[in-house]
Image (cartoon, helix red, strand yellow):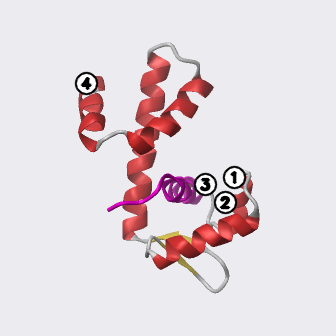
């Protein structure tokens, strides 16, 4: 399944917000990411068309099975890579920023090797 980095970030954000809130709306995503509501609306339309999310008539956003799968994969990569970089002595903020970039381009094989090595 090929999905772009922006879509992965949106899905990961929906997952993170859904862990902290009873419902997630476009405005919540816009606030979290610092984006305009109009940009988020376009992204949500694209994710809905690709069946990665559903949106209720009230505007509540939920991950579909495929959306959740992608979001959890990216979230796991982010968390593990951030923690690994911090363990190596990288400042937590820098580690998180670097992990955010790496999580989208690292191959499954390389990530699994790092995960195995760390654990």
Query: Relative to 16, is 118 above or below?
Result: above
Kindly identify which residue carries mark 1. Answer: 32
Q: Are marks 3 and 1 in contact (CB under 8 Å)?
A: no
Residue numbers of the magenta segment: 1-18
Disc 4, SS: helix
Query: Please, what secondary structure does the residue beneath circle 3 have?
Result: helix
- Residue placed most toward the observer, 88 or 104: 104
Q: Residues within 10 Å of mark 2 (few under 14, many from 20)?
A: many
Q: Is residue 59 left or right of residue 84?
A: right
Label 2 – label 1 distance at C-alpha? 5 Å
Are the residues flagged by discs 2 and 3 in contact, CB closer than 8 Å?
no
Would residue 83 be found to the left or right of residue 28 on screen?
A: left
The reply to whether the C-beta atoms of the residues labelled 4 and 3 are less than 8 Å apart is: no
The residue drawn where x is 44% and y is 56% is: 71
Distance from the alpha carbon under mark 2 to that under mark 4: 34 Å
- Label pair 2/1, CB-CB below 8 angstroms: yes
Which residue: 42% across, 62% down? 68
Q: Which residue is mark 3?
A: 20
Tell me the quarter of the picture where residue 102 sits: top left
Residue at numbered disc 4: 117
4 or 3: mark nearer the eye: 4
Q: Residue 56's spot in the image, x, y percent?
A: 59, 82
Q: CA distance from mark 4 to mark 1?
A: 33 Å
Q: Residue at x 50, y 38 (%)?
A: 101
Frontmost residue, 104 versus 90 = 104
Chief secondary structure of the magenta portion: helix
Please tell me whether residue 117 is drawn above or below residue 2 in the rendered image.
above
Is 2 inside the magenta-drawn segment?
Answer: yes
**Residue 25 in view:** no
Residue at numbered disc 2: 29
Screen quadrant of the N terminus = bottom left
Q: Earlier in the sequence, mark 4 or mark 3?
A: 3
């Amino acid at each position: 399944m090929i999905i772009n980095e922006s879509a992965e970030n949106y899905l990961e954000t929906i997952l993170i917000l859904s862990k902290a809130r009873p419902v997630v709306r476009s405005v919540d995503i816009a606030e979290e990411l610092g984006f305009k509501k109009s940009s988020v609306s376009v992204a949500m339309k694209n994710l809905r068309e690709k069946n990665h999310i559903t949106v209720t008539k009230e505007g509540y956003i939920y991950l579909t099975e495929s959306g959740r799968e992608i979001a959890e994969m990216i979230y796991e990569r982010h968390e593990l890579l951030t923690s690994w970089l911090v363990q190596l002595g990288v400042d937590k903020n820098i580690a998180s920023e670097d992990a955010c970039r790496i999580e989208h381009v690292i191959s499954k094989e390389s990530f699994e090797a790092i995960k195995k090595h760390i654990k």
